[in-house]
Image: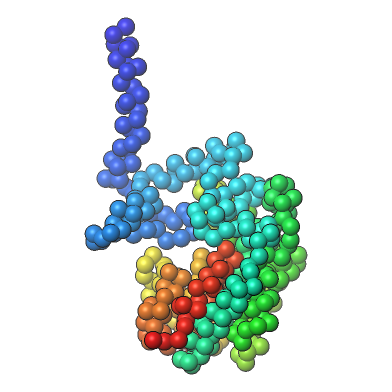
Amino acid sequence: MKKLFNIYFYLPAAFLLLLVYYPFAANIFASNTEMLDNRPLYEKPKSFSRNFSRDFEAYYNDTFAGRKKLIKKYTKIKHKLGIDSGTFFNGKNGWMFYDSGKVPDGYTLIDYFGRVQFSLPELKQMTEGLDAAGDYYKRRGIDYIAVAAPNKHGVYSEFMPDRYQKARVSEKSRMDTAIEYMVQNSHTPIVNFRNVLMKTKKEVPYEIYYPKDSHWNNIGAYAAFNELLSALNRRGYHLPVVPLTNEMISVGGKYNADLSNGEADTLYDVSYHDEMTSKKLRDEENGYIQVYENPGALSPKTMLMIRDSFGIALIPYLNKVFAKTVYLHNRYNKREDLERFIAEYQPDLVVDELVERYFDRFLKYNKLYGEEK
């Protein structure tokens, strides 16, 4: 009985210690190096600062050994039980959606419901900010265009849970009404990709967003890419637009979805000037800074794109259009960084890409792009 008592007494403590210290011990021999959330991994902080503990925690949470297996098992259990797991929720027919307000990382459900719209002062502030950005680049001899990608929720509303569909008051989101206002009251071009994506969704027999991921796939990105080229052509560019056909689309394998963390989506490829290849000149900060060169591109110009995660799928297409392409994550959308990269690469064109949940960043553009001191 004494031995039995000792087992029952020490077993929970031993299990708890194993649970707590296993990742630390496992990290001696291995660590996670795989991107599971469609974003670069956090890097290990190299020097002490006020944010060292926070930065190290973010790094450790990304790289501890066994992260992929643990997340995969955890997600499968919740998925089988029909439980919404943190930052995502289950929709119909196996579709999953990002609830970015839990992070927060924008507010996808506020965008979807349509109840909340930007106020008139906010619309005026965003329009002034858009023009401030356009004027900032114009003074430097650089063309500027802003483009916006809709959240998955509105594009595939039919797969949203019934309770959310019933709570939706308008198919027109606050981004849609804001862009309409900005187009009418701004002298700087801005493009909403929603219409072309909804049109493409009806015309092709494939998904244009990943069912278990928060992003568009290569088909949706190509449709948006064509819309961008058309917008540039209306401004005097002469870029050949190749309409999307079913024959251009093929299955390219599997894609690690960022919401399911284990279940893969179908990866589609779109054939576009496959004979062209581009050379990567620079890749830093886990992909947050990338530079490509393509001497055989359709245009001799240099393009700089300020992007979020939706911009990644545009890269293979844009690399074949412009002779040099520079991609900066929007963490570099700061005055000192912009000055540095503009001086280094001297772009002819800046494309400012934002996903819908980040659209309110235009409220900060007056401060970012205002008159130089």
Q: Is residue 254 something that shows in the picture?
A: no
- Farthest-out residue, left: 48
Q: Nearer the viewer, residue 181 or 145?
A: 181
Q: Image quarter for residue 252?
A: bottom right
Residue 34 x, y percent position in the rendering:
42, 54
**Which residue is painted at 42% across and 61% down in the image?**
40
**Which residue is painted at 76% across and 65% down in the image?**
202
Q: Nearer the viewer, residue 220 or 357?
A: 357
- Farthest-out residue, front: 121
**Which residue is painted at 57% across and 68% down in the image?**
359
Residue 352 x, y percent position in the rendering:
53, 77
Picture layout, residue 12 above or below residue 224: above
Which color mode does the image show?
rainbow
Residue 52 x, y percent position in the rendering:
29, 57
Residue 96 x, y percent position in the rendering:
61, 50
Q: Quadrant of the N terminus?
A: top left
